[in-house]
Image (tube, rainbow, N blue to C red):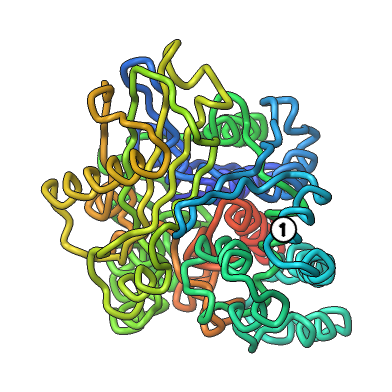
Amino acid sequence: MTKRATILGAGVSGLSAASFLAQKGWDVTILEKNSTLGGRARQFSAEGYVFDMGPSWYWMPDVFEQFYQKFNHTAADFYELKRLDPSYRVYWQDQSYSDIPASMEALEHLFESLEPGSSVQLKKFLKDAQYKYQVGMQDLVYKPSLKLTEFMDFRLLKGLFSMDLTNSFSNYIHRYFKHPKLRSLLEFPVLFLGAMPQDTPALYSLMNYADMALGTWYPMGGMHKFIEAFAQIAREQGVKIISDAEVTQLEKHAGKVLAAQDIQGNRYESDVFISSADYQHTEQHLLNGAANYSTSYWDKRVMAPSALLFYVGINKRVENLRHHNLFFDESLEEHGREIYKNPQWPTAPLFYLSAPSLTDPSVAPDGCENLFFLIPIAPNLQDDEATRDRYFEVLLERLKQLTGNDIKDHIVYKRSFSISNFKEDYHAFKGNAYGLANTLRQTAIFKPRIKNKHLSNFYYTGQLTVPGPGVPPSIISGEVVANYIHKTHQP
C-alpha cells in the first residue's frame, strides 16, 4: 500500500524532500503558505523588473548537478548556467577595490600583488580546503546526525580529526596570510554561515574552496530558475504542490500526527509529516506540547543575521560595478559586534550590492538596471519604515562616493524587506534570514534534530536543522530526511 507524506513548505528543502520521497514511491503533497514557491528563494516582478527575493550567489554547482542527475536531468535542461568572471568586486576601506578573478592563475597574481609569497600559501590553503570540502560535502553533510555513532568509521574519524573543528576560522586564516585585505577576502564567505570568523570552526575553509575553485555562477533568467526546476522535478515524480495553504493546526493522537489542517480548513491525512517551515514556529505554534525543544532552548540559540534588503529598479545604466559587489569600506569588527555581541542597528554597516542586469538583460527593461542591496543586521531588532529609509540614504551616498553612481533621481521602483517581513512571510524565528549560526556547538549532532522525539511520524528539514543554512545544504537536508524516512517507514 502506498504511503503518504505531507510536507509543510515549498522552499528548497521541502521541494528536495518531496522529490526524493516521491521517487521512492510515496504519495507526496506539499502545503505552501505563500502564493509563490521557493521560500526565501521566491521571485517577484514589478515595472518590468524581475527580482530574486533572497539567495543571489550560486555556489557549489556540483550539489545542484548531483540533485538533477538523481532525477535523470542536468542543469542545462532547465537554464543556462554562466560562470562570472570576475566572481565579484570588493571595495576596501582605503577606497580602492579588487576584482576577484575566476581563473586560479589570475587569483594567484592578485595575491602576490598584495603579499609577496602568498600565492604559494594560497595553493597550500586551497589544497587543505579541498580536502575539507570533499570529506564534508561527500560524507559529513549526508548524515542524519541523530547519534554520534553515525560518524564512527575510519574515514570519517580521520576526516574529523583533520577538519580543524576546534580551531577558529580567523586563527586559521592568520596562519597563512598577513595582509589585511587577503584576510578579509578569505574570511568573507563565512559571513554567509552566520557568525564572525573568530567564532566559526576552521572546518569552513571549505567555503573558500567553493568560492575560489568551484566558482561563482548565475542561472540566466534569475536564481528562481532553479526553484522552477525543482518544482518541475517534484511534479514529474507525482508530487502535488498546493499554494496559499498555510498549515495552522496539526491533529495528534497516541504519539502520532494524524492530519494537517490548512488556513482554508482543508484537512490532509498522512502517514508521515515533514516541516520544511521554520523549525521554531512549528515547535512552538503547531505541535502544542510535543516539541523537541523548549522556549528557553530557542532563546539560547545563536542565530545567523537577519537582513535589510532593498529591491531597486533604476532607469539608467551603472558604471564601476560588477554583478556581485561587497562594500568592505567600513569596519567588519564593529559591524560584527553590533550583530552578535551588542545587537543594534549598525553604526557604519558593510553591505552587499547585486546588479544581475549587468549579466542578464532579461531582468530589467532596456537601458535600465536591477539592483539588490543587502545589509546584514542583528535578528529581532525593532524594524520600522523610518529606519529603513535612513539606511537607504546611507547606501545611496556610499554608492555615489565609492563608485560614482548617483542613482537617487533615477529610481523608478523600490521595495524594502526586513525583520518584520521575514517573520510575516516565513514565520522566521526572530526574523532571521540565514538560520542558525554555524558555531561549533551548533554543528552536526548539536543542531536541532530532524526527528521529533515525541511523535513517531514527524520530521524536520531546512536551514535550522542539519546540515545547515544556505541553498546547497538545504538541498541536501531534503535528501537526508527523505532517505531516513524511507528507511524507517518503508511502504
Vertical relation: 362 (above or below) 175? above
- The residue singled out by tag 1 in the image is 113
Vertical relation: 421 (above or below) 441? above
Closer to the camera in the image, 335 or 92: 92
For image coordinates 50% across by 34% down, the residue present is: 320
Residue 292 on image: x %, y %:
42, 77
Q: Can residue 5 be seen in the rendering of this structure?
A: no
Callout 1 secondary element: helix
Which residue sits furthest right? 154
Vertical relation: 41 (above or below) 17? above
Residue 75 on image: x %, y %:
73, 33
Which residue sits furthest left? 386
Q: Quadrant of residue 297?
A: bottom left
Q: Is residue 310 left or right of residue 208?
A: left
For image coordinates 17% across by 56% down, the residue present is: 383
Q: Residues within 10 Å of mark 1 (few under 14, many from 20)?
A: few
Residue 52 on image: x %, y %:
45, 34
Q: Quadrant of residue 264?
A: top left
Which amino acid type is marked by label 1? Ser
Closer to the camera in the image, 428 or 390: 390
Closer to the camera in the image, 410 or 264: 410
Which residue sits furthest top? 366
Query: How many numbered markers are drawn?
Result: 1
Q: In which quadrant will I find the C terminus?
A: bottom right
For image coordinates 31% across by 16% down, the residue present is: 47
Residue 115 on image: x %, y %:
71, 67
Q: Is residue 417 left or right of residue 447?
A: left
Q: Is residue 384 left or right of residue 40?
A: left
Q: Can residue 196 be seen in the rendering of this structure?
A: yes
